[in-house]
Image (spheres, grey):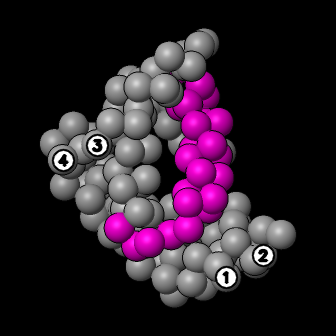
Amino acid sequence: MKQELYQELGGLDKLREIIDTFVDTMFDDVMIGFFFRKNSKQMLKDREFEFAAQFLGADVKYTGKPLGAAHKNHKIKNGQFSRRKQIFKETLESYDVPKHIIDLLMEHTESFRVPITKTKNSDSVARQSDTKLS
């Protein structure tokens, strides 16, 4: 099933384009952009692409650190996590990604809220994260 997801999205080239736009938007964002400025934009694009491609069933291996370890030195708050999630959602929507794929990617993203933000209960924050950025 998952192999069909990345193909249904438009293939790896389309996913790469989506991820490039997503990372560019995060770097420029006033609320969360500062988290990324010390990192290589291309490296982050590559890791985000690998992570999404692997989740969507492509034969691509994620080569980054486990997400908890990769974010342990950052004090990422729930609102900042929600901002990243919303940017990702709006980027996917702007590329006309099918809703069921967006929903799966949002659920997958949400599953990492606790290890990244170090919070115990994010349900109420997660429900509030569906506001538009614009």
Tell me if residue 102 is in the magenta stretch: yes
Q: Which amino acid, mark 4?
A: Ser
The secondary element bearing badge 4 is classed as loop
Residue 3 versus residue 82 in the image, above or below: below
| Residue at the (56%, 60%) spot, across then down | 99
Going from the N terminus, do you reach mark 1 or mark 3 first?
A: 1
Q: Which amino acid, mark 2?
A: Gln
Report the Cα–Cα distance between label 2 and label 3: 30 Å
How many other residues sit within 10 Å of disc 3, few (<14), some (14-19) or many (≥20)? few
| Residue at the (59%, 51%) spot, across then down | 103
Q: Which residue is mark 1?
A: 7
Which mark is nearer the camera, 2 or 4? Answer: 4
Residue 39 versus residue 86 in the image, above or below: below
Q: Which residue is mark 4?
A: 134
From the viewer's perspective, tell me whether residue 20 is left or right of residue 72: left
Main SS of the magenta segment? helix
Q: Which residues are magenta?
A: 94-118
Q: Residue 34, percent across and down?
A: 23, 42
Q: Which residue is mark 3?
A: 132
Is there CB contact under 8 Å for labels 4 and 3? Answer: yes
Going from the N terminus, do you reach mark 2 or mark 3 first?
A: 2
From the viewer's perspective, tell me whether residue 24 is left or right of residue 119: left
Residue 73 versus residue 36 in the image, above or below: above
